[in-house]
Image (cartoon, grey):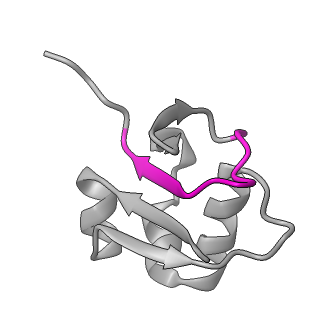
């Protein structure tokens, strides 16, 4: 079973699709590690994730920092900062 990634807003636009299923290696244990692994494997991901300060994440629909664990997660969402209005 893979890990479902969901992208929102300009992250989705830059990646070119709203979601994908991935199978990261066992040493990918945090959101930041997942982002690094994706960026290393794809020029599209690398370009979308170039400025990590502009990325936010949710693991299984709970907002988390990029240092949060992805071990046992079913879904990781990556998106720009959310603003209200």
Instruction: Name the residue rendered at 43%, 79% in the picture.
Output: 44
Q: Is residue 71 one of those drawn in magenta?
A: yes
User: In this view of the protein, which residue sits in the foreground, 14 or 73?
Assistant: 73
User: In this view of the protein, which residue sits in the foreground, 43 or 18?
Assistant: 18
Using the image, determine if residue 12 lies above or below residue 64.
below
Is most of the magenta stretch helix, strand or loop?
A: loop
Using the image, determine if residue 69 lies above or below residue 50.
above
Q: Residue furthest top?
A: 85
Q: Is residue 70 one of those drawn in magenta?
A: yes
Using the image, determine if residue 5 lies above or below residue 66.
below
Instruction: Name the residue rendered at 65%, 79% in the picture.
Output: 23
Question: Magenta region: which residues?
Answer: 67-80
Quarter of the figure that contains the C terminus: top left
User: In this view of the protein, which residue sits in the foreground, 81 or 53?
Assistant: 81
Using the image, determine if residue 31 lies above or below residue 35.
above
**Could you tell whether 40 is left or right of 53 in the image?**
right
Provide residue 64's location: percent of width, then percent of height.
Answer: 58, 33
Q: Residue furthest left?
A: 85
Provide residue 48's location: percent of width, then percent of height.
Answer: 43, 64
Instruction: Name the residue rendered at 29%, 53% in the picture.
Output: 8
Quarter of the figure that contains the N terminus: bottom right
Q: Quadrant of residue 26?
A: bottom right
């Amino acid at each position: 079973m893979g890990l479902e990634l969901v992208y929102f807003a300009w992250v989705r636009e830059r990646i070119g699709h709203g979601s994908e299923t991935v199978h990261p290696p066992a040493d990918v244990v945090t959101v930041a590690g997942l982002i690094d692994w994706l960026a290393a494997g794809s020029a599209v991901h690398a370009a979308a994730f170039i400025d990590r300060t502009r990325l936010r994440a949710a693991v299984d629909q709970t907002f988390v920092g990029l240092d949060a664990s992805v071990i046992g997660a079913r879904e990781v969402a990556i998106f720009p900062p959310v603003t209200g209005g």
